[in-house]
Image (spheres, rainbow, N blue to C red):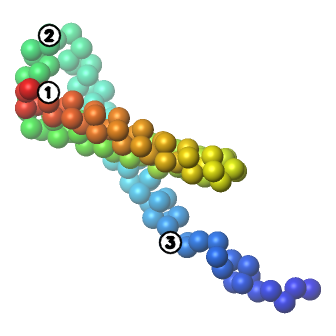
């Protein structure tokens, strides 16, 4: 029989609040991505047979640029949250885990920012 209470065993293992927030943000981005992905898919399909000038004209609309930027932000943020969970659950070496988390977040932030800049350049011209 152990005299150590369950609370004593749990102390120092982290806050329960961060995991709940992570869970909800991942679900919210997933729900937001459903209509955004459908909109992007239909837009890309509609523009697939158009010339370059027509596509640039379409992207010059503030609504189109905003929707594509929202899609890119939500997709990359959702990817970062999902990959963080995978790395935290399946990588057991702490050094590799921290390196992978930093690398994934830097890569996704860089590619997401580059993608949004490309949309804004198309919207506002160069």
Please provide percent x and percent y for residue 53: 9, 14
Q: Quadrant of the C terminus?
A: top left
Quarter of the rendering containing residue 60:
top left
* Of residues 114 and 19, the one drawn nearer to the viewer in this rendering: 114
Please provide percent x and percent y for residue 40: 27, 30
Q: Which residue is mark 3?
A: 17
Circle 1: element type: helix
Apparent side of residue 54 relative to residue 89 in the rendered image (left or right): left
Q: Which class describes the residues within 10 Å of circle 2: few (<14), some (14-19), or many (20+)?
A: few
Q: Which residue is mark 2?
A: 51
Quarter of the rendering containing residue 59:
top left
Relative height, residue 36 to residue 11 (above, below) = above
Sequence-wise, the earlier of marks 3 and 1 is 3
User: Would you say residue 1 is visible in this rendering?
Assistant: yes
Q: Which residue is mark 1?
A: 122
Residue depicted at x 92% and y 86%: 1
Please provide percent x and percent y for residue 106: 42, 43
Mark 3 vs mark 1, CA separation in Å: 41 Å
Residue depicted at x 9% and y 38%: 62
Apparent side of residue 1 relative to residue 110 in the rendered image (left or right): right
For the residues bearing labels 2 and 1, Cβ distance under 8 angstroms = no
């Amino acid at each position: 029989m152990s005299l150590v209470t369950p609370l004593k065993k749990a102390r120092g293992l982290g806050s329960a609040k961060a995991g709940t927030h992570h869970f909800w943000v991942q679900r919210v981005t997933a729900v937001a991505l459903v209509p955004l992905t459908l909109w992007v898919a239909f837009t890309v399909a509609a523009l697939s047979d158009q010339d370059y000038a027509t596509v640039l004209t379409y992207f010059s609309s503030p609504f189109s640029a905003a929707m594509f930027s929202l899609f890119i932000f939500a997709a990359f943020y959702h990817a970062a949250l999902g990959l963080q969970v995978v790395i935290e659950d399946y990588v057991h070496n702490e050094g590799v885990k921290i390196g992978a988390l930093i690398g994934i977040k830097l890569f996704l932030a860089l590619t997401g920012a580059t993608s949004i800049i490309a949309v804004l350049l198309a919207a506002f011209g160069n």
